[in-house]
Every structure is written in C-alpha cells, then in structure tokens.
Image (cartoon, grey):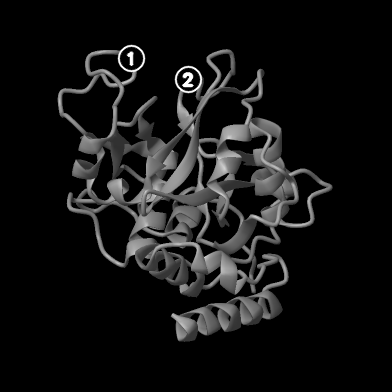
Amino acid sequence: MEHEEEKLEQHQAADGQSNQDFSMTVIPTDALACLSSSSQETILRLAAHAWDPPDLSAFPKSRLAAVLILLYEEFGELRVLLTTRSKALRTHAGQTALPGGRADESDIDVVQTALREAHEEVALPLSSPHIHTVATLEPFISLHRLVVTPIIALLTDPTLISTLRASQDEVSLIFSHPLEAILDPSILLKETLAAAGTEDWIYETELHSTTDSVVAALGDATYRMHRFRSTASPVKGLTADILMHVAEVAFGRPPVYERWAEGQPRGFATYFKLLGLPQSEN
C-alpha cells in the first residue's frame, strides 16, 4: 500500500499545480491507513481520475454551483452523506440532495463553495483535520441551468457524522447511503429502507426505478431518470446522475443496470451545446 499512497500524493500535488481553481489537498498517509484496503483503492481511483476541466470563464459566478460528495467508511464500506431538503423550500422540496449550492462572490473556488454550503446546511466544520479534499469531477447541468461541480472529500473520523445538525430552513433530514449500492442496488437489502408504498418509495420496483422521457430542451433527446430506494427519501434526478458517475469512477466498473437510454446525450460538453450555454472560444 506504501507505493499506492505515494502515487496518490504525487497525483494531488501535480493536480494542485496544474489547476489552481481546484485547491486539492494531500491526503496524509495515516488518513489512508485507517481505511480498509478496498476503500483505499476506491479513494485512489477517484484521486487519479483524469479529465479536461471546461473553461467556465464565460459564466457569471451566480451560474456556478458545487456539491460535496463526503465519503466515510463504516463497517468496511464507503458511505456518502445525503440530505432530504425541507418541504418549505421553493424548489426541489422534500427531495434528496447532496450538500451544496450556488457560488458566492466571496468564494475563492468551487471547493470553498461546496464546503461552505455543507457548513450552512449540516454544520460540517469549515476546517477539520479529518476532512480531506480528494478530487473534483466533471460538472453537470442542473434543471435551472446551473453548472454544478462535484467535489469529492474523505472524512476520516466517522464520529463527526453524529455531530452534524440540519439547517432548520433548508434540511429536514441528514442520512447516508452506501456508495457501491448506486452501482448494485441489491446491496441495499441489508439496509433498513423507507417503507414501500409511502411517499419515500411509491414505485413498483423494489430497489431501483427508471423512466425514459423525451426532453424538448435537449433537442427531443431521451433522458433516463434513475431513482434509488434509500433509508429516507429516494435518490433521484441530478443527485442520482452525479452519484452514478462518482460510483463508476470510484469502483472502476459500470452499474448492473442499463445506465443510459438509447440516444441519450452524454458528457458536460454535449449538454452545454444542446442547452445553448455560453462557452469560451479558447
């Protein structure tokens, strides 16, 4: 494992030099050492994921957003922190979400955006020796045409989860989900899931549901909506799309179900073009 830890540190140092917008931190050796070997490999895959960052200079900061994929290990598996949004909110009320939101003018970069929003929504400490930024992944386009960048972070002290507090105005519930279950929903059978037939799982299938719809805004292309049963509200929509990508990168394999509808657009560059979003000429 010593060689893999050295590779991780080299990758993060190089990444921080080549892309100053994404201020990656080096994960200490003892932080990795507290994980199981399988979780260490998963974190290494995420840190080593290579992609070409888009030029977002044409976007006003108000159109940029970030979400935090906070991973921590419990009983040998990596779990991701999720929230159920307050039903009093104007948009996506009662839906599952990753901590995150729009960038503030004062945010230095999207990493700070994700961490600040997580602090506001669930009281995650803004500065903790147990939270290590691992990587950023390709951005996604939200329903409101925001450019949403996923920020991956590792929490090495899971007891911190019990100290989190939901923002009264924004969050009704804090919960977690096994990351690998996004690729193989059968893993959820060991969880105490939301009751079938309630508002938290209205679908006929047991663990995973999909619907294909033609979307006019995407040039009448087909979009496949995925929904995953959880211990709380369903994981669906943009949150599911982001977590499917994170899980595929993390575990280095595709899901057991068919991820894409026939002819469905893929990748942020394609969505930028289809939605007519501004792009740099460089």
Quarter of the N terminus within the rendering = bottom left
Q: Is residue 108 left or right of residue 54?
A: right
Q: Amino acid at mark 1?
A: Glu
x, y percentage for residue 104?
Answer: 77, 43
For image coordinates 75% across by 51% down, the residue present is 127
Identify the residue position indicated by label 1 in the image. 199
Q: Position of residue 260 (x, y in %)?
A: 25, 51
Distance Cα–Cα, label 1 vs label 2? 10 Å
**Residue 109 image offset from top left, x and y in percent:** 73, 57
| Left/right of residue 276 with respect to residue 221 in the rendered view | right
Front-lying residue, 187 or 143: 187
Q: Nearer the viewer, residue 147 or 108?
A: 108
Evaluate whether residue 211 shows in this view.
no
Q: Decide: is 269 above or below 225.
A: below
Q: What kind of element bears circle 2?
A: loop
Label 2: how many Cα within 10 Å (few below 14, some 14–19, many 20+): many
Secondary structure under the numbered disc 1 in the rendered image: loop
Taking the spot 19% from the left edge, 42% from the top edge, the residue there is: 186
Is 178 displayed left or right of 100 in the figure? left
> Between disc 1 and disc 2, whose residue precedes?
2
* Residue 203: quarter of image: top left
Q: Are marks 1 and 2 in contact (CB under 8 Å)?
A: yes
Q: Which residue is pictured at 41% across the width and 59% down the height?
A: 267
Q: Is residue 7 left or right of residue 180?
A: right
Q: Is residue 44 shown above or below 3?
A: above
Specify whether residue 197 is in view.
yes
Q: Which residue is mark 2?
A: 94
- Crowdedness near tag 1: few (<14), some (14–19) or many (≥20) residues, C-alpha within 10 Å: few
Viewer-proximal residue, 275 or 205? 205
Q: Residue shown at 48%/75% (left/top)?
A: 48
Tell me where residue 39 sits by quadrant: bottom left
